[in-house]
Image: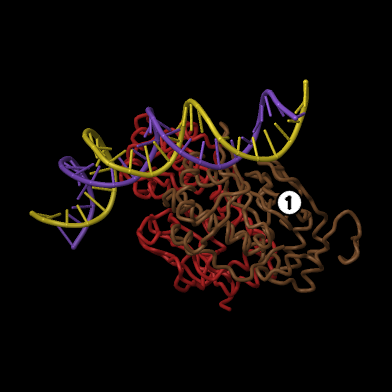
Chain colours: A red, B brown, C yellow, D purple
DNA sequence: CGCTATGTTGATACAAGTCAACGCTGGTGG
DNA sequence: CCACCAGCGTTGACTTGTATCAACATAGCG
């Protein structure tokens, strides 16, 4: 019991009461009571470099994380090294819930930028469910949202052509990045490798490159500074045949 | 408030106190208090024919369902009719949670056999979260489990070859059917069309047929009575390169 | 300086899609 | 009763999308 959230000067920097995510209109606001709980639910921060592996498939973690700053991705490997990226994690996204609920983690997570995570204590999850029904509801909501996103990815990989699929994925990432204000200021490019896209799309690296070229030729995107910049979001969306994210203010923890 | 669960003679047949799923060792048992809540959470039963559409993408349903008897599948459509099947629903599986939490349903559900569903009232979900933390936990667990399954499907469609993929899918369905006792007695075949498999695997119908033939030639499966029978589960699993389901007793609602 | 990681492009091979035809079954209506 | 039709499975021939291989360009880095 380290007391109230406002005045913990210790090792980490962002008390929940000053959580920058609360300022974004993508997220709903905490009630004072929720804020109080979350403040003591958070037991630390974890900062890692670009390229660092944050969570490892097969391990048994005592923590759950929320992305505070930066961007990463979730993936699984086959024995011979083939990799499938399942989804990307942006600020406000929860990581490791599966591992905590079901024992063993079934995927790994890697950072695409320097990433800062809020660390939550597994052992306090009980009291979240027992005493904070609204947050328990949010947790379920968050899980259902991930499910919805995976449904759309599955549709994409299973039934869309390489061009549609690529346009979909870039639209998706772009919209998500926009929603959390990651494309303001100078940094307008999404820090991805073509290998990342290939491993998300279920395509080979070479074919991904050629597909991106088609999108570049149509002026829909540009590839620069080791990343992708979206020129015409609407055009890209049209190519993909996707409806786009339709989220209002969403909860997070 | 229609009183205790034991004596409602009305229109439906299975009081929760006699829920047949409770007998299966795949599922965990309810506590008396949980049972009491679930009994009044359940407001009816819905029975549909094979081929009936149970839930429709884009609609706004006031109910959640649990499969009591039978088998179905979840799918999405593209505008031009391409279909992607996301997952199959077996007894004990929850349907429609997404729609209830997030407003609009993003997929449809169709019955593969005659199906009976328990119908739960959306409006009572609040009191589940408020007063039955253990069930709220289960709900989150169930959502996380679906997520895990979708991760594996995504890996499969994205990175496994047609043969591996098909072997994986049949193994998956077979294991799930076994776990809920659907392959006892005479009915040893899974009631699927090759079109269903194709739409799950992201393959064309013809190519699915040819891939199934390879598996038949190796004596791993047999196609008969409009469905698939698995001859050698271990062999099939070996072809797929999948580890198999590792579930102990799981919760359901 | 020579690494390594990344992106690019062309040539070729192969997996999967498409088209077409046919067989079997069960149902339905004349 | 038979004729017809629709749904499902099967197979072969051909086409196309995507993978693989190989070579090269560039940039960052120790």
Position of residue A45 measured from the top left corner of the image (x, y, whole percent): 47, 67
> In terms of depth relative to the viewer, which is nearer, B173 or A167?
B173
> In terms of depth relative to the viewer, which is nearer, A56 or A1?
A56
Determine whether, in the image, residue B243 is placed left or right of residue A221.
right
Q: In this picture, is B99 found above or below A77?
A: above
Q: What residue sits 79% from the left and 54% below the top?
A: B121
Determine whether, in the image, residue A78 is placed left or right of residue B209.
left
Residue A11's image quarter? bottom left
Question: Mark 1, chain letter?
Answer: B
Position of residue B175 measured from the top left corner of the image (x, y, whole percent): 58, 61
> In terms of depth relative to the viewer, which is nearer, B214 or A56?
B214
User: Which residue has dot 1 on it?
Assistant: B115
Q: Is residue A91 visible?
A: yes
> In terms of depth relative to the viewer, which is nearer, A181 or A77?
A77
Position of residue A58 measured from the top left corner of the image (x, y, whole percent): 46, 68
Position of residue B191 measured from the top left corner of the image (x, y, whole percent): 64, 50
Q: Classify mark 1: helix, strand or loop.
A: strand
Q: Is residue A181 visible?
A: no
Determine whether, in the image, residue A184 is placed left or right of residue A35.
left
Position of the N terminus of chain A by quadrant: bottom right
């Amino acid at each position: 019991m380290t007391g109230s959230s406002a005045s913990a000067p210790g090792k980490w920097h962002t008390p929940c009461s000053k959580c920058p995510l609360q300022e974004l209109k993508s997220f709903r606001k905490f009630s004072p009571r929720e804020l109080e709980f979350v403040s003591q639910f958070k037991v630390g921060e974890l900062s890692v470099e670009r390229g660092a592996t944050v969570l490892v498939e097969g391990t048994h973690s005592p923590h759950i994380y929320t992305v505070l700053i930066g961007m990463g991705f979730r993936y699984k490997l086959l024995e011979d090294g083939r990799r499938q990226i399942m989804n990307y994690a942006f600020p406000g996204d929860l990581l490791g819930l599966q591992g905590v609920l079901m024992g063993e983690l079934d995927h790994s997570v890697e950072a695409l930028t320097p990433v800062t995570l809020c660390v939550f204590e597994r052992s306090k999850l009980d009291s979240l469910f027992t005493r904070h029904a609204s947050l328990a509801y949010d947790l379920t909501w968050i899980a259902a949202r991930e499910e919805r996103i995976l449904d759309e990815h599955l549709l994409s990989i299973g039934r869309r052509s390489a061009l549609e699929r690529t346009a979909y994925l870039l639209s998706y990432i772009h919209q998500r990045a926009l929603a959390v204000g990651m494309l303001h200021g100078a940094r307008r490019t999404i820090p991805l490798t073509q290998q990342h896209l290939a491993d998300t799309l279920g395509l080979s690296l070479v074919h991904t490159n050629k597909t991106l070229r088609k999108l570049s030729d149509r002026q829909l995107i540009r590839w620069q500074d080791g990343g992708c910049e979206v020129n015409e979001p609407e055009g890209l969306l049209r190519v993909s045949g996707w409806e786009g994210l339709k989220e209002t203010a969403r909860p997070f923890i």
